[in-house]
Image (spheres, helix red, strand yellow):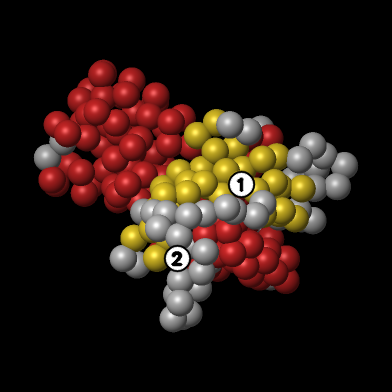
Amino acid sequence: MKSFIAFVLGLGLLVASLGARAEVPDPDVLIKNTVQDVLSIVKQDKDIQAGNQKKILELVDAKVLPHFDFEHMTRLAVGKHWRSATPEQRQTLVTEFRNLLVRTYTKAFTVYRDQTVEVKPLKMLANATDVTVKTIILKPGEPSIPVDYDLEKTANGWKAYDLSVEGVSLVTSYRGTFSDQIQQGGIEGLIKTLVEKNQSASNTPLRKAESK
């Protein structure tokens, strides 16, 4: 349960909208600033804390999604099977995996309480295009949780394509599940499973998380 909350919390905290800035901030600065922005919004919005699905999805869509490379994430999660997928199947996989992740980490916004995030300074070469930013999620009275973010520099700025909680990669975790599903039903079988999960989730309202 701790790892699940850390995953969704980490995803929710990862990046908010800094697109209005002309210059591209360094990855650690990007994360540090946006963590503060997101936490500030969530802590002040009682509707989001109570699980208002419309407001949460609007926040996620506006502040978070533009800064993820979902195609890269999906390609890594599908692994070697990506090569055998048609262009249409690849697009559907990206869409459905994106929807699955969105639904998962929107739940994180109902568990924010008094967490803080410490972002470790990043030593980065001037020409670096792929980096890992290390952070720690802190909550009084509980063990700290390390969360590492993998980002790549693109023409549109730094984009996140994976994160690891306590050394466990999100993408790698899904890769094992996806591989099993592909072995059983092929690419179409995986797509069918993702579609069904997303349809089921869309019919289930978000609920306020229990305080721990």
Q: Residues within 10 Å of mark 1 (few under 14, many from 20)?
A: some
The x, y position of residue 42, in whole percent, is: 67, 65
In front of the other: 75 or 50: 75
Residue 112 lies in quadrant: bottom right
In front of the other: 43 or 54: 43
Task: Identify the amino acid type marked 1.
Answer: Lys
Q: Of callouts 2 and 1, which one flags the residue occurring earlier in the amino acid sequence? A: 2
Check disc 2 and report the residue beneath it.
61
Direction right: furthest residue: 141
33 sits left or right of 155 in the view: right
The x, y position of residue 80, in whole percent, is: 24, 28
Badge nearest the viewer, 2 or 1: 1
Can residue 35 be spotted in the picture? yes
Can residue 209 be spotted in the picture? no
Name the quadrant of the N terminus.
top right
Q: Residue at x 71, y 47 (%)?
A: 137
Under tag 1, what secondary structure? strand
The x, y position of residue 157, in whole percent, is: 39, 65
The x, y position of residue 92, in whole percent, is: 23, 46
103 sits left or right of 180 in the view: right
Q: Residues within 10 Å of mark 2 (few under 14, many from 20)?
A: some
Q: Residue at x 33, y 37 (%)?
A: 76
Q: Residue at x 55, y 31 (%)?
A: 168
Under tag 2, what secondary structure? helix
Task: Identify the amino acid type marked 2.
Answer: Asp
Check disc 1 and report the residue beneath it.
134
